[in-house]
Image: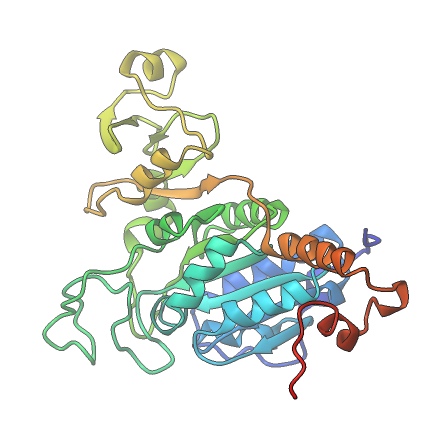
Amino acid sequence: MNKKVQLNKSDFESHLEVRWCPGCGDYSVLAAVQRYLASIGEPIEKHVFVSGIGCSSRFPYYMNTYGFHTIHGRAPAIAMGLKIARPDLSVWVVTGDGDLLSIGGNHFLHMLRRNPNIKVLLLNNQIYGLTKGQYSPTSTKGKVTKSSPAGSPDTPINPIQLALGAQATFVARVIDVDAQNLTEVLSEAYTHRGTALIEIYQNCNIFNDGAFDRIRGRDERAQYQLLLRHNAPLVFGRNSENGLIVENGRARAVEIGSNSSESVAKFGITTYDVTNFSLAMAMATIPQTDDACVPMGVFYKVDRPCIEDVLAEQLKDARKKAQLSSSAKDNLEELYLSGNTWTIR
């Protein structure tokens, strides 16, 4: 176990100037991650940030940690290889909706089902920002952009629903400006052993400004955000005057008047369970109409073996079966020649 060290947020700030657009939501995410990592006291050299291509993928430059700025969509594959080779490291992927869900979609899917102990920060601004405003896989249908002047014809990807369908073991959603909830979710993700996806609604104030205004301001958050808490009733509203009843996989909102135990029981408000897949899927698929609540927090969390642990056991068994000498532990040639081989005559 690593020895805890005393660190400050500034210890995680690199010497490079942060070059995102003024007002970009990426700033608040970067600050929250730096503050959180300082608080847990793990040595700086134990963290690695891996990114693909996009605005958010500049993240590793601004962290005073190890990091890779890799190629488009390939961050999950590179991070997974790193984690298998160095399971002792804390490995993070920072990516955007275009990078992870378009060109990187296949790598993302297979990482989730393999479940390496990696934390994925998906900064979703529903637009390609770096290339100046084309519609992305999460852009809303009908979205007018430079590449969709008549409106996007595509049905957008729902990242939470996609991750659940790919057998992810930890799925969460937060918004960039809610520092408290973001930090709480970072903490839960970090302590979860397995792949943890955190979708972060992030405002691109240049090419998609206001995409999340309905839940971004303090008043709007209080009105429409539904914070998912394990073993707590599904209530929302400024005074928790609304609740959700989930039946047959569908959520139905009702007005309950007040968040008292009597009101919750009287209306049969559903109690949330982060290990219940059907409940998580019901929250993920709530239609995002103007008056609907928007679930935030941890949707789903279950335990399943990590691929690096499974592979380590397989390697251990293979060495044992091959009866390799103790000196051959790191001898790749002897390992290769220890099993079925052919002689070419």
Image quadrant containing the C terminus = bottom right
Q: Position of residue 260 (x, y in %)?
A: 39, 16
Return the residue nearer the eye: 304 or 154.
Answer: 304
Left or right position of 243 against 123: left
Left or right position of 46 against 224: right
Please say if 158 is above or below 82.
Answer: above
Please say if 16 is above or below 80.
Answer: below
Q: Position of residue 174 (x, y in %)?
A: 43, 50
Quarter location, residue 188? top right
Q: Position of residue 292 (x, y in %)?
A: 23, 41
Quarter location, residue 105? bottom left
Seen at 31% across and 81% down, the residue is 132
Seen at 78% across and 56% down, the residue is 320
User: What colour-coding does the image apply?
Assistant: rainbow
Please say if 215 is above or below 152.
Answer: above
Quarter location, residue 314? bottom right
How many marks are shown on the rendered structure?
0
Seen at 55% across and 43% down, the residue is 304
Return the residue nearer the eye: 109 or 180.
Answer: 109
Q: Position of residue 126 (x, y in %)?
A: 31, 65
Left or right position of 98 against 13: left
Considering every residue shown, the one lying at the far left of the view is 150
Seen at 51% across and 61% down, the residue is 29
Please say if 284 is above or below 35.
Answer: above
Considering every residue shown, the one lying at the far bottom of the view is 345
Return the residue nearer the eye: 219 or 30.
Answer: 30
Considering every residue shown, the one lying at the far front of the view is 345
